Image: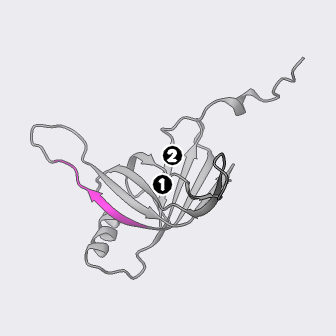
Amino acid sequence: MPAEPTNLNTLDPLATFRFSVDIGGKNWLGVFTECSLPPVEWNVEEIKEGGRNDYIHQIIGHRKAGKVTLKHGLTKKYELMSWYAEMMDENYKNYKKTVTITMLDSEHKPVLRWNLQNAFPTKVTWPELKTGDNAVAIQTLELAVGHVEFEQNPS
């Protein structure tokens, strides 16, 4: 007879709509509606051995560069716009920030956390402005990401 799990709640899938974003130590800079986390992927170098046609050695290479995409509603807090403006002005002093994305459970307690080190904006897509629409102004921010740290059950 197979063993039964002692806590079935740990098997419940986590909802993706509960998350918080902290950029450079400043939480709640906007209402973030979407977040696509960067994939963690490595380059693989293939080495063919002479005389062997049935086997190829695969050697791990460098980690591929990752990007994160955030969508958020424009607000009257302009810290994010100031960050973009610094980049557009080619002011590269202190332009890299730590972006922390925390996934929350149904009780809004943190369950997973990604710390994205040395992130900086590479692309900003502004919202479409239409007089006939009654929609929230959503902009897209794409960030290049350096080192990725992953935390399980953060406190």
**Which residue is labeled 1 in the image?**
21
Q: Is residue 121 magenta?
A: yes
Q: Residue at x 71, y 33 (%)?
A: 10
> Can you see residue 76?
no
Place of residue 12 in the rendered image (x, y in percent of width and height, measured from the top left): 65, 29
**Which residue is labeled 2 in the image?**
19
Q: Residue at x 32, y 81 (%)?
A: 91
Residue 83's quadrant in the figure? bottom left
- Relative to 58, 27 lies left or right: left
Q: Residue at x 48, y 38 (%)?
A: 17
Place of residue 146 in the rendered image (x, y in percent of width and height, measured from the top left): 51, 67
Reply above or below: 26 against 11.
below
Residue type (three-letter) at the residue carrying disc 2: Phe
Tell me how many marks there are.
2
Figure quadrant of the N terminus? top right
Q: Is residue 85 magenta?
A: no
> Can you see residue 21?
yes
What is the span of residues highlighted in magenta in the rendered image?
A: 120-128
Is residue 128 or residue 73 the one in the foreground? 128
Place of residue 90 in the rendered image (x, y in percent of width and height, measured from the top left): 29, 79
Q: Which mark is residue 92?
A: none
